[in-house]
Image (spheres, grey):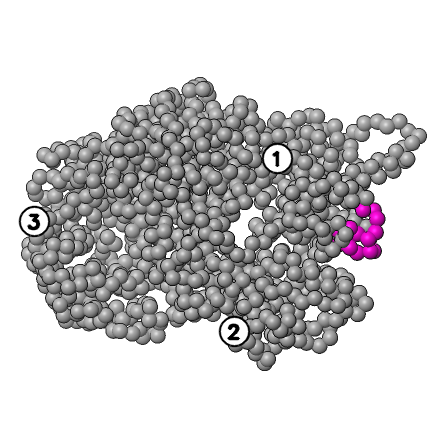
Amino acid sequence: MPLSDETKDLIKAGLVTKPCIKCGDGSHPLINCPGGTRALSGSVWKSLKGTEVKEAENEYSKIRRAYVTNLKAKKKAAKNADSTQATTVPPATEPIIAPEGFLSAATVNAGIPVLHEATETAQLRSIQDQALAEQVETKLGAPTPAPGTSQVLTGHLHQPEATFSQIVDTKFPLRKTLSKPSSQVLTNHFEVSWNDDTTFYVYEIMNIPICNKRKAKSIVETAIQAWDFLNTNEDYFATDYLKTIVAWKNLHENIQCPRTTAREGEVVWAPIPIADGDRRIELSLKFEGSMNLNRLKDFVNPKSKPDDATLPNFNSSPLVTHLNTVISKSLTDDVFQTSSHKFFLKTGYSPLGTSNSLCIMRGYDYTVRPAMEKVLLNVNIATSAFFRPITVAEFLEDRTFAENEREKRIKRLRVYIVPDRQSVKDPDDQKRVDNLNMPQNRIKTIKAFGKPIGNRMEPRLSFPKWIKVGNQLQQNGEVHVVDHMKAVFGQAHKFDEKLKAVNVGTDDDPIWYPQEFLRILPYQLYNNLLPDKLVDSMLESACKTPPEVRARIEAEGLKGLGVIQSNGVQKFEKCNALSIRPNMLLVPSTRMEQVFVAYAAGNPIAPKMDDKAQWNLAGKTIFLETPTANQNLSYYMLIDPELRDVSATVKTYKTAIAEKVSQHGIAKGATCVAETILPKNLKDGSAPDDRYNSNPDIEMAINTCKNMANGQLVVLLLGKRNIPVYSAFKDVADRISGLQSVCVTEEKNRGKPATDKGLGQYFSNVMMKVNLKQKGRNHTVCDNNKGGGRLREVLRSDPPKRGIMILGSDVTHPTGSSLVGCPSIAALVGSTDYDGGKFLGSMRLQNRSKKEMIDEIKPMAKERFQAWKDKFNPAPHILYYRDGVSTGQYEQVVKEELIQIKEAWKEVWPKEVGDVKMTAVVAVKRHHIRLFPIQGDGHKNGNCKAGTLVDSGITSPFFSEFFLQSHHALQGTARPTRYFVLENGIRLSDTDIQRLTHKLCFTYVRATMGVSYAPPAYYADRLCERGRQYLRDWFTPNYESAHYKDYQSEKDTIDQKHKSALKSAILQLPKQPTLESRRKARKSEAQAKLERESRNRAEDEISAQVLMKAKAYFNERRAGGCGPWHKNLDGTMFWM
């Protein structure tokens, strides 16, 4: 609400008169008000409501600046009364060298004197005052339903011309052809446009102290209000609230503040400082330069400048980032951001299963993407779990998490002090109480938990009691936290003294509260793995049909960005320089040719591409290659004691295994040569939910069987899916016993006879895994039902010189639930046939956590090449599928991984003349692009049909890129895989790469359907997952296990060592003064820096220890091999 003229006049009149019209203190006028945490009790400020407080602050800043400017001018005029005023020349010590595009007119103000020293800290705009004006939400509003499926607009047709650049020197291969479109699909992209010659002026706020993002945002917001060239131009710029300002107007043209000495080529100003309590923050503003958006328009329209050799290599990322920042300015008050490109609806929440601690919230990802002829805004749904705004006591009582996990889950969460502090008699003390009762000052962060709050024997729950003597605070004995709470908040606010106290201070200076007094603030993301019992509920909520997804994006997602759902182009609400058309883009699409699946005998099978793109193994389907066909399969069986019907299930499963190995040609028959029932309880006393989490039980069971007879395979029969048991089983079988292994469950087959059709199909699928583990191959693909155009004809298209060997790689990373320093795992797989039916693998730990570029890609590639050489000998061409890297890492893959793969090839075939020919393709599954069929074209579940291809409209303006939905989505909205060609040394055409990739998707070795992305990358992903099972204690630790307790003990020891060193270092710092009305001195910036460095060193040390122990465990059974598994498994796809 705008201020009335009367209020503005009162502020102007009260500027230099006492008492202060802001805080009410009679010792100073408004212009000398310290601000900070003082209560707003002055005659004018106490009458303000809501946004009027912020408006009053802005008005005061304008009046104060005018007053100070006028005062300085009068003093200067008096001093220079007898001289002629002349233009001041900039001092030689402050060179102004303008970046390209910087207007020379800005140098006119170079002679402005530095006035900041004359401004007292108390007169500066305060971060604390700014924060107090921010609204604090402590509860969720009434939930709103998601939009209905009818709330959509018609699509906006986009058919780009087929323009192919002839430029030679580009960082990636140029697109040479486009597929012939057969239909159209809608895609979750919206056209963004701007006026010709729109220019972005980019600035950086410098010298922001090292702090968290929340504090940085407060600093930026305060600076904007303190600096008139920003607060008078808020309609013309956006900020990321970290340091960057993006304006569509020149903000520095008439800037009235001194410049600082800058490095050559930089323009830096020193605006008025801001205050952080009693300290000054001397910020500066740097002009980074201007960016004309016409360059981006040229980039997406290659035909506009066909002879510009630099255009394909134009780095659009900075402009894209700035466009995202500008678009984010239009986010409405109904949403909240969790990152620079994601927001959630404040009222878009629903229950998460039976949990009282968590809820599900609807949100949206958004980002700008340069595409063919257009710049697009991609918007997609997001679904995440958030903490519910309940009290800490309610959270710790709830059974969402195991009791030993609950405290860990809410550490570092922000909480709100619910009860009001009682009024006191002393007026000055009452001001302090009023200040502490202000919403922003009630926000705290959970640091730790202590003893029960009523424990009178615990010394940490008592603290010094302070009394006021004059203007000083003096210590007067000690008070227990329970007595303090009752004295401060009153007897009416009850709490259970048996519950643990909550520390919202620090380890050295704890501040204790009862659990009932602290409410978890809303809108805090839960970023760990969900408990198993909530996964189904989350999947059900996240899994939406294509019509539901489309409606949510159009009617709710765009609305959150301030876009009205209506046909036609419209301006963004808070940036009139940009426009958007809120109609989903309609782009050309095509369908890939029918793929046929071939086995060892019989006619090839045609998956029904218009239906589910799958087939079954009905009848006597003999797998493509079965090396053990003339043998009998001997196996062990480990039996879960929790089976509902042990004898019947075991008997049925043994019969099914014997029948199916024969039916599919794997072996003449199968015999269980030994079996044992697993123990019910763990030896190490782990939680019941994690039965068999220690390997000794599994190892003992396998050894018992091995002592009875020789077996080739071990079968684990579980009552139902159990990840801890499965992980332990695979770890022991692979790494210790060196046995091939499969796991089957009773749950979905309970009570079925051996003749049941569903049970038969289940075990046919199991047999695909068994055949792989016996060095077999299951199927291949071809072009027709006569067997013509087999995959091997494509991969051996250059005989007798070279065939094509296929590689696939991936890296898996730890999550927020993993141990600090838990290593990432990299895997590389390589083909050993021409039918796409057999790949062997290598695995390594990365040298540090969460590193994406593969450290040991060269030795792993040598292992894969050697396996190929052992089979075929001649050096092959290489087709490499790289899973999961982001767009910004593409060049890094080329410069690091591809070079090392080529070096490995050269070392394995040193006599080969010339370099290897390699085609490298990134396959990205985790992205936000979706395709929606037009009416009459899709599957009955609302998705596009399998084989849908899009290679124009939403793809790169220059480079070879395509989106392929090679699978049928059983539920939810299908996600096409994004393929981007990094290198094309084999010189495959764009169409050849698309067709080959599509064919490979039907060769996945353990499925009878087309899969969602290229199997070589998929196999590497699965091999990485097997590595996670080996290192389960690191990736998903059990908090009650001996392994985790050892880790926690070592971490505590390291933390304590660094804290002791930190205390010694702090003692060497100059002592800080204790200001009036404070209990102790405020922490200096030097101390804050020491503390940050200490924390970082402690984390680095524990990370190094964790990595060292993980590597030791990883390699303890086998060092120097192609992976940590037993050498017996090297020649098989054991991990599938």
Location of the N terminus by quadrant is top right
Residues in magenta, as a range: 14-28
Residues tagged 3 and 2 counted as in contact (Cβ below 8 A): no
Give the residue at mark 1: 235
Residue bearing the label numbered 2: 499
Image coords of residue 91 (percent x, y): 77, 33
The image quarter containing residue 988 is top left
- State the predominant SS element of the stretch in magenta: loop
Magenta residue check for 236: no
Is 513 situated above or below 898?
Answer: below
Q: Nearer the viewer, mark 3 or mark 2?
A: 2
Can residue 857 be seen here? Answer: yes
The answer to whether marks 1 and 2 mark residues whose Cβ atoms lie closer than 8 Å is no
SS under mark 2:
loop
Q: Is residue 25 magenta?
A: yes
Give how far across and how far down residue 121 sits, in percent.
76, 50
- Which amino acid type corresponds to the residue marked 2 in the rendered image? Leu
At x 35% / y 33%, what residue is drawn? Answer: 186
Q: Which mark is residue 712?
A: none
Q: Compute the Cα span from label 1 to label 2.
A: 51 Å
Q: Is residue 517 above or below residue 249?
A: below
Going from the N terminus, do you reach mark 1 or mark 2 first? Answer: 1
Residue carrying label 3: 620
Q: Nearer the viewer, residue 458 or 668?
A: 458
Position of 966 with respect to 193 (left or right) is left
Residue 140 location (% of width, % of height): 50, 54
